[in-house]
Amino acid sequence: MGRMTEPTKPLRTTTSAKGEATRNQILDASEVLFARNGYLGTSLRDIAQEAGVRMGLVHYHFGNKHLILDAALERKLDLLRSTIAESFARAEAGEKFGLEEIVTAFILPFLQSASRPEDPLRNYMVMTSHLMSSYRLPELRPILAKLSVVSQIFIDRLRQHSPDIPEASLLAGIYLIEAALIFMVQDPGFLDDITQGHHSAVRLDEMTGPALRFFASGLESLKAP
């Protein structure tokens, strides 16, 4: 009778699992720092220190800062897109689906997530809002342009609901709404000062009512006479 062979041991995956964990540490740290300091205010050394890893590992996994940004943005883009799409699905299932409901479906997830420290999209939304001020940097434009898949959901619903708004006026209105939203989400304290304590950047969801009525009324005013 021949010798019994030992069972084949499974291949070790410790190295790849550890590498993936390190990669996510770096991306988590990048999300926090880009949200806090923006792109230009964050260095690779800052990211390594925040992540608790050696600089060599940052270079090994990503190479340079704008590739880190690209990976950080891609990581939760599908989650953001699905969150907005689900918000619209709930709104469309309601009894009324007018301009205010369309604006609500788009704006509310941003304001709510930005107000909840434990929300998985909180730092991501603040990060992407803060980074829009770096849109002028040529190497960042293709990266930040990926966020247009989220805006497009809003644009498509507005076009379907209000075909009587001239295209140029509609796009101007969307730009103004998104510009205001970007500033609101990244604002560290201007809201507190300008409203003399009536509202706060850390309780941004309290601004929901006034913001939604204001944006919806603005869009309504753009309809052709």
Image (cartoon, rainbow, N blue to C red):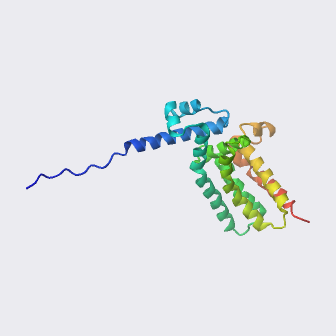
Indicate the quadrant where residue 156 lies.
bottom right
| Residue displayed at 61% across by 42% down | 69
Q: Nearer the viewer, residue 98 or 152?
A: 152
Please indicate, yes or no, whether residue 51 appears anywhere in the rendered image: yes
User: Along the horizontal axis of the image, is 6 left or right of 98?
Assistant: left
| Residue displayed at 50% across by 41% down | 23
User: Along the horizontal axis of the image, is 218 left or right of 91?
Assistant: right
Looking at the image, residue 210 lies above or below residue 44: below
Hey, which residue is sitting farthest left in the picture? 1
The x and y percentages for residue 215 are 80, 55
Q: Quadrant of the N terminus?
A: bottom left
The x and y percentages for residue 142 are 67, 48
The x and y percentages for residue 174 are 78, 55
Q: Quadrant of the C terminus?
A: bottom right
| Residue displayed at 60% across by 45% down | 70
Looking at the image, residue 162 lies above or below residue 28: below
Indicate the quadrant where residue 134 lies.
top right
Q: Nearer the viewer, residue 16 or 118?
A: 16
Q: Nearer the viewer, residue 21 or 108?
A: 21
The x and y percentages for residue 208 are 73, 51
For the image, the number of numbered tags is: 0
| Residue displayed at 81% across by 38% down | 194
Indicate the quadrant where residue 154 lies.
bottom right
Please indicate, yes or no, whether residue 200 appears anywhere in the rendered image: no
